[in-house]
Amino acid sequence: MSGNKASADNKMQYDYDLFVIGGGSGGVRAGRLAGAMGKRVALAEEYRMGGTCVIRGCVPKKLYVYASEFPAHFEDAKGYGWTVGETSFDWNALVAAKEAEITRLQGLYTKGLDGSNVQIYDSRAKLIDAHTIELTKTGERVTAEYILIATGGRANRNENMPGYEYCITSDEVFDLPELPKSIMIEGGGYIAVEFANIFHHLGVKTTLIYRGARLLSRFDKDVSDHLYESLLESGVRVLTKNSIKKVEKTQAGLNVTLVNGDVETVDQVMLAIGRLPNSADLGLSDAGVAIDKSGRGAILVDEYSRTNIDNIYAVGDVTDRVQLTPVAIHESMCFLETVFKNNPTSPDHELIPTAVFSNPQIGTVGLSEDDAARKYKNLEIYRAMFRPMKNTLAGRSDKTLMKIVVDADTRKVVGVHIMGPESGEMIQLVGIAVKMGATKDDFDRTMAIHPTAAEELVTMYKPTYLVRDGKRVEA
Ligand code: NDP
């Protein structure tokens, strides 16, 4: 029997060429494209197609960010000669509009899979062995040559904290029956910062509480500092080096006892203290799939997203590499190249641009100044702080921050950090240049577009200061 014939027979002994567990960004992309290649594919999703990003993450969050920006637009309009009539906000109308939009997107995801002949199982799935999957809704068992686990992450609910059950996470926040009058949000990362802004600008009395000293602790220090000042200036209450010890339900609301002994009463408490890999009850040990020993439960994968079991792969948040939607999609594309196109391809996790949709936004790519100083001996730091043009007539004092970190020896731009309106859009494009290895001279010889905020990125000709062996020195 020829090798090809043997492998064809081997394939046909399975119901599917590929079984995907999880209908989020990573899983749907892999399933749809494998189906389009003519592979026999099935995908199981226990909840709604689209996963965290579409259903209770990036997409609804951005819609809520837009909603929260309107009060500032109404205010700013005065400076431009407009008189804005009485305004009011209807939380339930926003929730309903959001729901219609994510239902539309959910439908598109399903349609894409259908169009690629992917068999969809509306059920939770778990592994029985390395090639067998059980659909828990019906008990049906199917087999597949390859299995891709793309089950994403879940919010850390801090179950050791007394009263955690009274707290919400990003899972519940989008569908609260009413807009709370006050909220305490715990965490200093993406979600905490974004939701502190959303609620504050929607008129909710908002307290952000963070265990560390510096919000967005992994970002450039200038960005963290500017964010902290912006939050305070806009009226968000920020408590640092403090955290929630316990939460009790009373008639007046939720009584929150803080680690420093203070007790406060709020309508809602939201925990935004990170997300954990969603790997429990998947039958991983039955199939022999190894998870990390740290207790977070990440599925361990090699550079091709392959687990310790040859035919089982995992992508996205369940692997706890970089918790971002586009990264999960990229990992899926690499998986397809590796497994079905005979082109082993490792995901590239270097220089990932990212944005925090705070108000104003943050966009960042590459190394922070501190990380760059640990890696490079000589740095040039270019830094600008200015009032964006729109804020002049609006009478707004908010400033935009732009910072470029350059390895002085090679002139390579190793980090760009922006905080100001539209930073997310800007950093996507700057990210291309940085990924291509652009030098500061490339930035300098790029013609500015006037008048824009982004022109500042190509007109900072003189370093603001230098860093030598980790120490700041004047330029
Ligand atoms: P992050 O990892 O961004 O931040 C978690 C925060 O919670 C940190 O400030 C951390 O503190 C703190 N924390 C962790 N454990 C505890 C604890 N036990 N008690 C108190 N505080 C704690 O996670 P998020 O939940 O904000 O978001 C999850 C992921 O989702 C992000 O990592 C991001 O990748 C992704 N995301 C991306 C968005 C975007 O691209 N715009 C938007 C939203 C989410 P410390 O700093 O001290 O560790």
Image: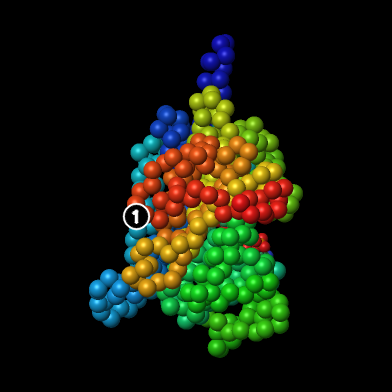
Colour theme: rainbow
In this view of the protein, which residue sits in the foreground, 267 or 360?
Answer: 360
Is residue 77 at least partly visible in the picture?
yes
- From this view, report whether residue 10 is shown above or below residue 246: above
Q: Quadrant of the N terminus?
A: top right
Q: Give the residue furthest to the bottom.
A: 251
Q: Report if the beta carbon of the residue with label 1 is closer than 8 angstroms to ligand 1.
A: no
Q: Is residue 410 left or right of residue 425?
A: right
> How many badges with numbers are in the image?
1
- Considering every residue shown, the one lying at the far top of the view is 1
User: Type of residue at label 1?
Assistant: Pro
Q: Position of residue 145 (x, y in %)?
A: 56, 31
For residue 392, what is the image quadrant? bottom left
Splitting the image into four quadrants, where does ligand 1 fall? bottom right
Residue 382 image position (x, y, % from top left): 54, 52
Q: Residue at x 72, y 47 (%)?
A: 469
Q: Residue at x 66, y 44 (%)?
A: 378
SS category of the residue bearing label 1: loop
Mark 1 lies on residue: 451
Residue 430 vertical placement versus 12 (above, below): below
Residue at the image position 35 percent from the left and 58 percent from the top: 101
- Nearer to us in this view, 328 or 399: 399
Q: Position of residue 65 (x, y in %)?
A: 42, 64
Counting from the top left corner in percent of width and height, residue 284 is at 66, 45
Residue positioned 52% across, 20% down in the render: 8
- Classify mark 1: residues with Cα within 10 Å, few (<14), some (14-19) or many (20+): few
